[in-house]
Image (cartoon, rainbow, N blue to C red):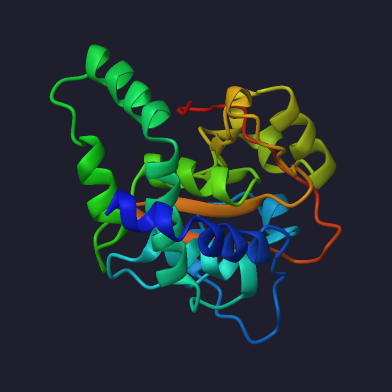
Amino acid sequence: MKILMLQHHQLLKHTAEQLINMTAVAVPEIIEDKNVSKECHRSFLSQYIPVHTQARGNCLWEMISIGLCNKKVLMKTLRVLTAYTLLEHQIHFEQLLAADRSIAKPVLDEFDDLTKTALTNKAWGNEYHLYALSIILQRPIYIYSTFKINIFRYEKCNASELKVMFDNKSILIGRHLKYIPDSQLGIQVNSCIPLCGFFRHSHYTAVLPRTNQSLKFIPQCSILP
């Protein structure tokens, strides 16, 4: 499989280049995921909207596809690009797995498992796949989780104040994650157009900005690298 992928290196790179600068903005006809919205701060929702993303095993890649073009049509392409990125940076990912292996047993994934999962329809993705996507798309991926909205002073803050809390790494906002390529990979990252999602009950949901000028709430917690 690695040989086949690398034989099509130019085609895969060209495909990725077509996606690098794509970004979607919420449109009137999208279906809001109101269950996820209930988990978000109201000032976050003034800038972003959780979009219904089907729960059938492809949600991670459909989340990214929706973030790119408002549709899930790129899901299969993104799976292939994920596998290609894993293989292209195999040593880097094996080092990450080895580091995980040293602190957590049993390790849920071996390298071959990651690539096989990426190429298998309806197979659940994980943080390694998100990290691979951030590499091939050359941009950050922000994954939000339940906001701590039951704190009185925090509940009433506006969007600008919420952004400051993110920037200051406040524990009041909850635990949210970012995936950004390791600087050692030499990848030029476009931080101006992050892709966003929400993780809840083992399910990824797309999150779209309401406008091109939506504030950026940058998570400060990074699992990988």
Quadrant location of residue 70?
bottom right
The answer to whether 105 appears left or right of 43 in the picture is left
Query: As drawn, is 31 to the left or to the right of 130?
Result: right
Residue 63 percent location from the top left of the image = 49, 63
In front: 169, or 84?
84
Instruction: Depth check: give the residue in front, 191 or 86.
Output: 86
Horizontal and vertical percent for residue 193? Answer: 74, 52
Which of the 4 image quadrants contains residue 165? top right
Left or right: 60 with respect to 149? left
Q: Is residue 19 left or right of residue 145?
A: right
Q: How far across and how far down the image is residue 83, in percent?
A: 37, 52
Q: Residue at the location (67% across, 42% down)?
A: 155
Whether residue 102 is situated above or below residue 29 in the rendered picture: above
For the N terminus, give its image quadrant.
bottom left
Q: Is residue 103 above or below residue 159?
A: above
Point 38% across, 40% down: residue: 128
Which residue is drawn at the image coordinates 40% and 61% (left, top)? 80
Q: Residue furthest bottom?
A: 29
Residue lying furthest top: 102
Residue 179 against residue 82 in the figure, above or below: above
Q: Nearer the viewer, residue 211 or 109?
A: 109
Q: Provide residue 164's location: percent of width, then percent of height.
A: 79, 31
Please indicate, yes or no, whether residue 53 appears anywhere in the rendered image: no
The part of the image, by quadrant, that contains residue 186 is top right
